[in-house]
Amino acid sequence: MADAVVIPGAWFGPGAPLLMYAGDVAEQRGATVHRHSWSREFPGLDQPEIEGWVGGEIAPLIDTVGGRPLLIGKSLGTNAAAIAAERSLPAVWLTPLLTLPWVADALGRATAPFLLVGGTGDEAWDGDVARRLTPHVLEVEGADHGMYVPGPLTESIAVLGRVVVAVEEFLDAIRWPS
C-alpha cells in the first residue's frame, strides 16, 4: 500500500484546495493520505532555521508512515525538500520557495523525481530555476502564491484543475504508486 504525506504552507492548511486535491489524486490511486498540521509557531519564513524546523515536524511523521511516501507540500512545506533529498522520496511541490537558497539547493540534491508548480506572479517562484531542477514543471502565467490569476474567480478555479491534471500526469510519468 502506498502513502502520501501532505505538508501545508504557512497560511494554506492541509485542507486548502491545492493541497486537498493533490492529496485526493494520491488517494484515488489507493494511497493512504496523511495530512499534517503544524503543531507550533514557526520561525521566520525567510530564515535558514526554518528548514530544520519543518524537518523536525515532518521527519517523525514520515518515520511513522514508513516506506517511501509521496510528499506533497506547499510553500513553507517545501522546506521538506531536504528530507525528500536525503530519503530519495518523490514529491509534488506547490508554490515552492525557489528564491530561498536552501530550498533550491535541496531540490538540486534530489534523486527521486518531483513536480514543481508555480506562477509567474509569485515572488517566490523562479521559472528558470524550476526548469533547471526538473523536467516536471507547471508554470501558470500570472498566478500568484495562492495560484490565483487576475480576473474572474472562475479563472483561478480553472488553474486548480490544471494543477490536478499536472499532478495526475506526473504520477503517471513516474508510475506512482508502483
Image: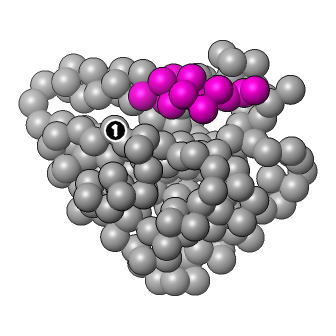
| Chief SS of the magenta region | helix
Instruction: Name the element at disc 1.
Output: strand
Horizontal relation, residue 44 to residue 5: left or right: left
Residue 76: x and y, percent? 50, 61
Closest to the observer, 52 or 40: 52
Q: Give above or below for 54 relative to 163.
A: below
Closest to the observer, 58 or 171: 171
- The residue under label 1 is 138
| Display colour scheme | one colour
Horizontal relation, residue 85 to residue 123: left or right: right
Is-magenta flag for residue 134? no
Tally of numbered discs: 1
Horizontal relation, residue 124 to residue 91: left or right: left
Q: Which residue is pictured at 51% across the width and 31% down the height?
A: 170
Tell me if residue 176 can be seen. yes
Residue 62: x and y, percent? 80, 53
Q: Give above or below for 139 relative to 125.
A: above
Q: Give above or below for 155 relative to 14.
A: above
Which residue occupies the extreme left position in the image? 151
The residues colored magenta run 166-178
Residue 159: quadrant of the picture: top left
Q: Which residue is pictured at 75% across the width and 26% down the height?
A: 178
Residue 80: x and y, percent? 61, 62
Q: The disc labelled 1 sits on which kind of residue?
A: Leu
Check the picture and name the quadrant holding the N terminus.
top right
